[in-house]
Image (tube, grey):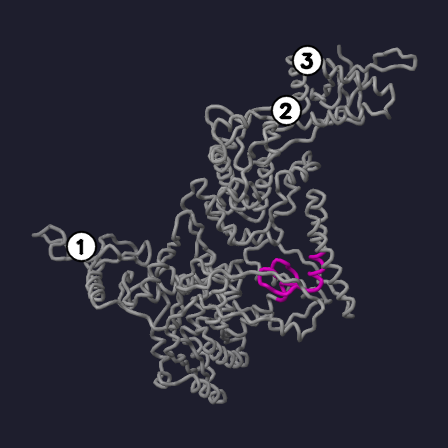
């Protein structure tokens, strides 16, 4: 029997049709034939005032159950959403496929999916499994919860306040439920079919299944036979053991890998970006999350519309809000190594270091010649980027920054006085060029170290007013408006969290108290009203410092009302400055000669203490870990009492510096000399300049000179001391000449001191001769081991480094969001390889040799240690 009805308020969810046909108690759409699960025809028995039962037919609207998702399904939506955002930022299309492969490999190792090729199985519960996953997949404890609710409802029915009519209805319902329980097969089939038709699931309990790693951990707590009892305990009645081991009893590696969090998503994306050799590096990924371009916080948009209503509760149950969504570079880098080892990815791809260096050169607003010099160094000795152990994600970004630091250190000394004198002479020449440059003949101005330093520092301050992540990344002071806004956002976020996690109200009270205290302090100070800087939306960029600042300059060039004052020197483009003049001054000399002026280039004197600074190492008698203690804040104290209460920190003695290095004994030195003679002969440790450059003595021979008519045996009178394969030659020193060094050498500079250079520079300023100081390309070094160095040791090391050099290292490290010690470690690897790790470059012929044994013991140990990460 069929009957057509019309429902204006409940249209079809597939096609929108409002006319339905009734068939066997269910309604079907007339257009597409879809079954309406929420609308049913049921017969209801009602009692009239006379006490006579009547049966009526009503249309019952069944309320749809909330969708149930496991933690892996939730993170699958999150991972897919982040991949789509990265594709919109310009990532390669292969990212989607490779990410799916890595995600599938992770689920297979977790025994969640794709682990059984013969038959489909439910996901297995892992170590410290989520309770919601167990309830969704195995209905674990679901029936026990419903039984408790029924008992509670029954007790309330038998209360004295209920009427006789209500009691009769309740008794009739209980009798019907008892009848359905007595007929097990019928009730089970009816209940199962009803649940399947409405929600697609069943409430019947299923035996639990644990993964191999979880069973291994559980066997340490109970016998294997007892584990089976817990697996069959679907209602969770057994309380003898807990199935979720305590965190401190599990290995840290197992805890971070088997517990799903947003950190796993970041690690999967990092590995995928590396395998497809995308331009987006891990440092960019972390920065995108901090800037909000990659949604790690607002993830509701990644879920379908029918799931968004209940998704916050699901995210709370799976523990998503229990973990932070912003992580430091060090944390993600370590987790990437653990995840790669877990899914058996043993090797990462080395990105294009040259391209990475050019990108950072542009972001730092440096002349492009810096990238050219780095490219020549890489061609001379290509880095291998090997690490001390497998499954370790190397710091490729830090290596690229270390090359930039190395070049600038060679060209400007960065010892505290050399860069100042070079900058002073370059300023004088730029002032003269500003007066002599015309439309017909001009010369680019020279790159000035001191002016570039002021530019970068001011750019940090300006960008920090518009970008909170930039402020946090470069450790700049927040403005009052930013601080108040951040407190307000934190309070709003905590209010949202408290609706999901009520036990975190204490932190919210602290934030609210701090905000009120700060606002009261602002009122008592009678300060001017806080002016908020205009909000600018920055598009995601791989060169944020350069791109964001250009956008700010463009915005304020069109806007008449300026909320901040941008100095005039910030409009100078240092990328257009000339750095090649310090290497070859022929073009500048010709320009001054055209104006009847002379150019004199002087090399800075090489002092003994700058050739080698020393070696540092961890002291044998270290002070141990620092003792941490907390004191209560005392607000009733004046400034003098506060200064008196400060106790001076004891000097750290756990890092010792060595300036007098010891050598090997005489017998070992003789052995080193003998091995050095062997290395003069052709051997297999020849390292060629490029993979496509191999030079032999055959280049000077003709085929007719090698083969003779009477003797056709090849190479009869020719001894080959080099490899036989010949490829095209590439001149890595193209456009580089040492003739300029001869022209720049002056008999006075060899014996002139720093004071004499200063006096000579000031006296020659008024004459018709311009003086340009340049570095001798000598390199001071302070070498040591960086493995497991403590924070207190970092503080001691900072005091030994020149301020200008330390500023450059910290700026480069903050640009990529890492600790400065990582950039310094990569810099030591470069300095050791080029200054101590290879033979003299003046004697090589298209190939270089590693120096396997250095006569100085400390240097030899450092070379062997840093060659492992080269």
Residue 109 showing in the rendered view: no
- Magenta span has 158? no
For the C terminus, give its image quadrant.
Answer: bottom left
Q: Give the label on residue 703, or none.
A: 1
At x 48%, y 26%, the residue is: 225
Foreground residue among 773 and 816: 816
At x 68%, y 43%, the residue is: 501
Residue 699 showing in the rendered view: yes
Q: Nearer the viewer, mark 3 or mark 2?
A: 3
Q: Secondary structure at mark 1?
A: helix
Q: Which residue is mark 2?
A: 201
Q: Are marks 2 and 1 in contact (CB under 8 Å)?
A: no
Q: Quadrant of residue 244?
A: top right
Q: Earlier in the sequence, mark 3 or mark 2?
A: 3
Q: How many marks?
A: 3
x and y, in percent, of residue 86 in the image: 56, 46
């Amino acid at each position: 029997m069929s009957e057509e009805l019309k429902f204006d308020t409940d249209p079809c969810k597939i096609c929108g049709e409002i006319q339905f046909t009734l068939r066997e108690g269910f309604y079907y759409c007339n257009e597409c034939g879809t079954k309406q699960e929420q609308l049913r025809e049921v017969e209801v028995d009602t009692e009239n005032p006379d006490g006579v039962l009547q049966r009526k037919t009503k249309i019952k609207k069944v309320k749809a159950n909330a969708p149930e998702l496991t933690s892996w399904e939730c993170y699958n939506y999150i991972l897919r959403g982040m991949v789509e955002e990265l594709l919109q930022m310009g990532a390669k299309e292969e990212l989607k496929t490779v990410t799916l492969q890595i995600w599938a490999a992770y689920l297979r190792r977790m025994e969640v999916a794709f682990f059984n090729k013969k038959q489909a199985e439910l996901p297995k519960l892992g170590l410290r499994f989520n309770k919601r996953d167990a309830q969704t997949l195995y209905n674990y404890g679901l029936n026990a919860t419903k039984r408790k609710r029924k008992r509670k409802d029954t007790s309330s029915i038998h209360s004295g306040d209920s009427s006789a009519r209500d009691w009769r209805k309740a008794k009739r319902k209980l009798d019907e439920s008892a009848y359905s329980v007595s007929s097990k097969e019928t009730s089970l089939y009816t209940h199962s079919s009803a649940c399947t038709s409405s929600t697609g699931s069943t409430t019947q309990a299923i035996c639990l299944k644990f993964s191999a790693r979880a069973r291994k951990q559980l066997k340490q707590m109970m016998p294997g036979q007892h584990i089976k009892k817990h697996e069959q305990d679907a209602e969770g009645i057994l309380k003898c053991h807990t199935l979720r081991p305590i965190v401190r009893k599990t290995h840290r590696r197992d805890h971070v890998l088997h517990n799903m969090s947003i950190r796993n998503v970041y690690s999967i994306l990092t590995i995928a970006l590396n395998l497809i050799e995308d331009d987006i590096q891990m440092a960019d990924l972390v920065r995108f999350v901090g800037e909000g371009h990659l949604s790690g916080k607002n993830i509701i948009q990644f879920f379908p519309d029918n799931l968004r209503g209940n998704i916050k509760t699901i995210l709370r149950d799976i523990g998503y809000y229990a973990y932070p969504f912003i992580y430091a570079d060090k944390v993600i880098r370590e987790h990437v190594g653990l995840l790669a080892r877990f899914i058996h990815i043993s090797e990462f791809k080395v990105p294009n270091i040259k391209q990475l260096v050019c990108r950072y050169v542009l972001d730092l607003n440096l002349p492009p010649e810096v990238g050219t010099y780095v490219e020549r160094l890489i061609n001379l000795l290509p880095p291998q980027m090997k690490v001390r152990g497998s499954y370790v994600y190397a710091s490729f970004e830090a290596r690229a920054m270390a090359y930039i630091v190395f070049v600038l250190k060679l060209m400007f000394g960065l010892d505290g006085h050399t860069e100042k004198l070079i900058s002073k002479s370059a300023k004088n020449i730029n002032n003269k060029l500003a007066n002599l440059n015309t439309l017909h003949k001009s010369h680019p101005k020279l790159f000035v170290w001191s002016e570039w330093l002021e530019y970068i520092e001011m750019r940090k301050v300006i960008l920090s007013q518009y970008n909170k992540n930039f402020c946090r990344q470069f450790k700049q002071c927040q403005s009052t408006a930013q601080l108040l806004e951040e407190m307000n956002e934190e309070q709003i976020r905590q209010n949202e969290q408290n609706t999901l996690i009520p036990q975190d109200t204490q932190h919210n009270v602290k934030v609210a108290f701090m905000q009120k205290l700060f606002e009261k302090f602002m009122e008592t100070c009678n300060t001017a009203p806080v002016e908020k800087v205009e909000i600018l939306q920055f598009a995601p960029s791989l060169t944020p410092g350069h791109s964001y600042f250009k956008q700010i300059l463009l915005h304020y060039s069109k806007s008449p009302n300026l909320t901040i004052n941008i100095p005039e020197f910030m409009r100078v483009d240092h990328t257009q400055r000339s750095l090649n003049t310090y290497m070859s001054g022929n073009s500048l000399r010709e320009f001054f000669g055209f104006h009847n002026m002379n150019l004199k280039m002087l090399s800075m004197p090489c002092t003994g203490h700058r050739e080698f600074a020393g070696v540092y190492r961890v002291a044998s008698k270290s002070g141990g870990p620092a003792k941490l203690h907390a004191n209560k804040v005392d607000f009733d104290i004046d400034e003098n009492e506060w200064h008196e209460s400060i106790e001076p920190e004891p000097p750290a003695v756990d890092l010792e510096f060595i300036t007098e290095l010891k050598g090997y004994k005489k017998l070992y030195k003789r052995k080193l000399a003998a091995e050095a003679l062997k290395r003069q002969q052709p051997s297999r440790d020849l390292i060629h300049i490029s993979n496509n450059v191999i030079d032999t003595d055959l280049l000077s021979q003709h085929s007719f000179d090698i083969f003779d008519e009477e003797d056709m045996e090849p190479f009869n009178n020719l001894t080959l001391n080099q490899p036989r394969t010949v490829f095209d030659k590439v001149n890595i020193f193209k456009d580089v000449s040492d003739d300029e060094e001869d022209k720049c050498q002056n008999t006075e500079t060899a014996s002139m001191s720093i004071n004499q250079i200063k006096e000579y520079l000031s006296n020659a300023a008024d004459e018709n001769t311009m003086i340009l100081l340049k570095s001798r390309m000598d390199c001071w070094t302070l070498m040591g081991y960086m493995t497991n160095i403590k924070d207190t040791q970092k503080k001691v090391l900072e005091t030994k480094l020149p301020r200008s050099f330390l500023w450059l290292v910290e700026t480069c490290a903050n640009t990529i969001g890492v600790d400065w010690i990582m950039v310094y470690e990569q810099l030591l690897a470069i300095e050791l390889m080029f200054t101590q790790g290879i033979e003299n470059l003046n004697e090589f012929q298209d190939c270089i040799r590693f120096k396997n044994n250095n006569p100085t013991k400390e240097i030899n140990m450092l070379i062997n240690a840093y060659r492992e990460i080269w």
